[in-house]
Structures are given as structure tokens and as C-alpha cells.
Amino acid sequence: MSLNHSPETQNKLIARVPSITGRALPEWFEAIDNGPSFLRCEERANWLADEHGLTHGYAAAIVREHERRRRF
């Protein structure tokens, strides 16, 4: 699974996260922060998808956004 969506696809996925998942991004970021301490983003995305029933596309987009915002 690739975590590298185009910027346009990433923005569209992130915009739809609350309506598709029923949870806002900060809630997903908290779940990632409180979840297992995986070293790789792909592992976090797989865990998020498996643990919370997300598609891998949305899980990857959430993890990518989480990483992006942590850098700032």
C-alpha cells in the first residue's frame, strides 16, 4: 500500500474523513498518538485500517496528514 497520494487526492480524502468515518481529524490523530508505537507510517495506516475498520486509502491519508501536521 502506498501512502503517497497526489496532493489533490490527499486533500479530497482528508476533506471527506469526518463525513465518511463519523470522526474529526483530531480524534483520529489522538487514536494514532494513543495507539501502538509503530516506526513506519505504513504500519500505522495498516493498524488504523484494521483496528477501526477504515479503508486503507483513508487510513493512509489520515496517517499522512498526521505526520504532515506534526512537522509544524
Image (cartoon, grey):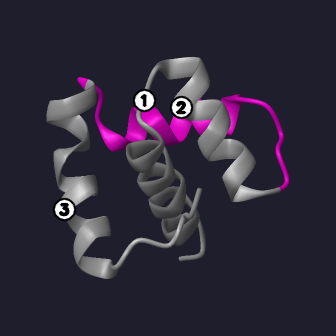
| Relative horizontal placement of residue 28, taking residue 41 as reference (left or right) | left
25 part of magenta stretch: yes
Q: Position of residue 58 (x, y in %)?
A: 38, 45
Quarter that holds the N terminus:
bottom right
Residue at x 42%, y 56% (from the top left corner): 61
Q: Nearer the viewer, residue 57 or 70?
A: 57
Q: Position of residue 69 (x, y in %)?
A: 49, 67
Q: According to the image, label 3 marks what residue?
A: 12
Above or below: residue 36 compared with residue 61: above
Type of the residue with mark 3? Lys
Above or below: residue 26 compared with residue 62: above
Mark 2 vs 3: CB contact within 8 A? no
Residue 65, by quadrant, is bottom left
Q: Earlier in the sequence, mark 1 or mark 3?
A: 3
Q: Earlier in the sequence, mark 2 or mark 1?
A: 2
Mark 2 vs 1: CB contact within 8 A? yes
| Relative horizontal placement of residue 24, taking residue 59 as reference (left or right) | left
Which label sits on residue 31?
none
Secondary structure under tag 3 reads helix
Q: Nearer the viewer, residue 13 or 29?
A: 13
Q: According to the image, label 2 marks what residue?
A: 49
Secondary structure under tag 2 reads helix
Q: According to the image, label 1 marks what residue?
A: 54
Residue at x 79%, y 57% (from the top left corner): 40
Above or below: residue 49 compared with residue 71: above
Circle 1: is it few (<14), some (14-19), or many (20+) Cα within 10 Å? some
Q: Earlier in the sequence, mark 2 or mark 3?
A: 3
Type of the residue with mark 2? Ala
Tell me the magenta residue range: 22-39
Secondary structure under tag 1 reads loop
Type of the residue with mark 1? Leu
Distance between the alpha carbons at the discs numbered 2 and 1: 4 Å
